[in-house]
Amino acid sequence: MELVRFSLGARALRVAGVAFMLAFAVLPLLWVISIALRPASQAIYPISILPSSLTLDNVWGVLFGPTGIGLGPYRNAAFYGLSSAVITAVASTLGGYALARYNMRAGEGLLVVVLALSFLPSASRIVPLFILFSATGLYGTSQGVILAYAAGSTPLGIWLMAGAFRQIPVRLEQAAHIDGAGTVLTMRRVVLPLALPGILVVATLAFIDGWNSFSLPLILIPKDTAQPYTVALQRYIQEIGYGINWPLLAAGSLVALLPVLTAFAILQRRLVRVGGLGGAIRG
Amino acid sequence: MKLDIEGLTVDYGPVAAVRELNLTVGHGELMALVGPSGCGKTTTLGFITGFIRPKSGRVLFDGVDVTDLAPQRRGIGYVFQDYAIYPHMTVRENIRFPLDAAKVDRKKAERDVDEIAGLMGVGNLLARRPHQLSGGQRQRVALARALVKKPVVLLLDEPLSNLDAHLRVEVRAEIRRLQLDLKMTTVFVTHDQAEAMAIADRVAVMTNGSIVALTSPTTLYVHPPTLFAATFIGSPRINIWATEGPDAALARRIARPLVGDDAAGLLVGVRPEHVRVGSGDLTAKITLTEPLGRDVLAHLAVGDSAIRALVPAAEATGLAVDAEVPISIDPAHLHLFDAASGDRVEGGRSPSAAAASTNGGT
Amino acid sequence: MAHRALGRATPWLLLVLPLLLLFLFLLLPYLLTFYYSTTGATIGRLLNVQQVGLKNFQVVLSSHAPSFLSVVAITAVFTTGTLVGSLALGTGLALALHTVSAGLRSALLAVFLIPWVIAAVIIGYTWRLIYDPAIGLANGALEAFGLAPVDWLTGQVSAIAALIVANVWAGYGIVLLVVSGALANVPPNIILAGQVDGASYGRIVRRVILPAIRPTFLLAGLVALVSGLNTFDLIYAMTRGGPLYQTETVALEMYRLTAQKGNVGQGAAVTVILFTVSLALAVAYVIIWRREARKWS
């Protein structure tokens, strides 16, 4: 049974609209990939829509070539992202469990405050963190950056984990206690395995946020070798004249896209479900 | 308006929800579609409304084929099972919505709303919002909204299921009175046979996507055309015994006055209220009594066969479990069905049994 | 028993780690910023700073290159454009997909959500490439239709328009996701009832569906608004606020004053302004959200 019976004209309009939006959504990415994978000599005016040949030279060039940024920035981004993911997962699980299981009136208020904080995008934190880190010696350290990332991802993580824990009936823990299991065992064998999907979502979102972060490392990591790819790729835009090296920049972007697109493809169903539960917004 | 459905077939995947259904509802008639869940009655209603596209079939309003017409243009009044009144609008706005959609002049629309609200008894609720209304009130609002546009046909999907039991009897009578006053062609769908029987002009009994009986309530009760109709209509349920199998002895004995010894391949039925307890040449043992207030439902056993009998309370004082009582059944109240096809058999001969020429004593 | 006492304290014990993390790296920085906005701190001199009261705010608000008024105007245009664009596209698409089969809808949603996982700065580089006057897709398309190429990122109007398109591309997916979720919770029967009542689809959307998702719609709108106000990465990657401050928004100004000009006090002042406006909006939407949600119980 159809929810709305559309006329043929309306149907056609809808198909056209969705098709246009699909094109809008996909073309920019395809264009970047196209520039990244075509020989640099073909990336000049006038440009052809389809490249006549494909090559991995640009990818090789940005990763290993003399004018590339190397693997370092990607390693850095991965390191910061994964570390943040771990810390966020731990903090969110602890916080989420506390809020879900214990009736704290302060807890409800806390949850709302925490959630409101998470809606303030990271841009508004760059100056504050800069000041804090400079005054406390955390400036330029990877620990500082990782903790800054984690603090940004934790509010939403707590909210999500609280939701996940609420879906695990307390009865299961009570049954485990009755069966003689101590707190640690109950957590390890009963609660955490059931909360694992939620933890994975939280960790993945935190990793993505960390991997994608630009403004924080821009201001907090001065040293070239410790910067993530987001900052490192900038070098191709320092234009003196028309000096934008598009092939390498596009290739660098392509490499950056691979991990997140893969993670997204694997977890998209869960992310969509989680995201629809109340507007998970990345700053 | 006269409503016709021709050759309706609807598939849900591999399953046929409705098969080759034909139905005519006369002008001003109240037709009930009744049957168990999944029998296709709501699907049929959805087809009349225009939400369900069939594999094949047509629907005609006064002879005009409206099958391809959008639901918006059919002028139908529909009351959903959950009423589906707009939660964010006041009662007044709800009832006025169809008139707004038809771009009726606002002043006239408000007058129409007041009129129908008065008729439905919700005139004092017009400023309220749905969440402030009781179930019964919501239903009236839904009805008012359906009727305000003076529809050509009124369709009701299980209108009484969400109401408290005692309200159901009152509300069904109100619906019937309203329908008669307005001379409104109405189709209503229900799984409750008592409702269907109480207020419909004709009842269509459906099962597995087809209509198996289509007739007046009285006929349905007194002369059910099929086994399914006989067992579906009437509560407590009709007694049925097969002349082959574990109840054969009882079945043949009861049917003998009608068919003599030529009782092969038959199903014998008698309604519990027609089992006379207290006199007769058959002896049964009482296994359970259920006092229902006005009557007592007595569960009896003859040998291994079970009989249900409905006894008026006044006559049931002596009945106790394990007591043995005489019972009799007037052959005039027997129903006979062919065991293979389920069709009613008149005159006592089972068409699918061998046609032996023993004379039946009809 | 210690057991008991521990029981009552347990939730707070569990919360120590997360609360500490949030306090130190989320709350404290903001508090410090408020303090520093009233000091004459610079990058070279962060401790032992002297109080200057509201002088930083004065200087910032009356600055000339760029004038704060123009910064605010650019921010307002950019944010409004992003808000309207992502709400319109996200909601329109959600409505279009609402009546599509669940499997197809999931697949399409996944595609439309891809920008959500891409770094904003990468999105910036991508669109900068598209707007490149020589080899970009934008001018390529114009030429295919016989129109003259445009130097997108060098004129103020075209640059801001280009930024809005890029930001809408980045943001409509989340509006789509949230509104889709809300649409799925609209009782289907009232949409059927609307059709039976003779309403056209447009009327049903206006008077039945959209009112039914109002709380979520408002939430999505306000989040898009706050997000638009704070957009930094994308603009930095595409124009750096140029040319000549013609796309300099408040967020970029905040960064420039702190990291480029080195005047931490002024940067903090702008941060305070931005933060206050964003927080006011955040509080506003929590209030409106709760009020709307209560109307429906």
Image (cartoon, rainbow, N blue to C red):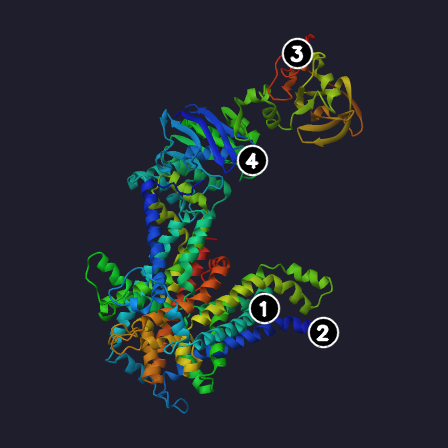
Amino acid beneath label 1: Ala
| Residue at the bottom extreme of this rendering | C48
Kindly indicate whether the residue at mark 4 contacts the one at mark 3 (C-beta within 8 angstroms). Answer: no
Kindly indicate whether the residue at mark 4 contacts the one at mark 2 (C-beta within 8 angstroms). Answer: no
Q: Which residue is mark 3?
A: B355
Label 2 sits on a secondary structure element that is loop
Amino acid beneath label 3: Ala
Residue found at x 67% / y 24%: B240
Q: CA distance from mark 1 to mark 3?
A: 81 Å
On residue A98, which mark appears? 1
Is the residue C296 above or below the residue C281 in the image? above
- Residue B294 picture location, percent across and down: 66, 28
Q: CA distance from mark 2 to mark 4?
A: 59 Å
Kindly indicate whether the residue at mark 2 contacts the one at mark 3 (C-beta within 8 angstroms). Answer: no
Is the residue C134 above or below the residue B349 in the image? below
Q: CA distance from mark 2 to mark 1?
A: 21 Å
Of circles 3 and 4, the one toward us is: 3
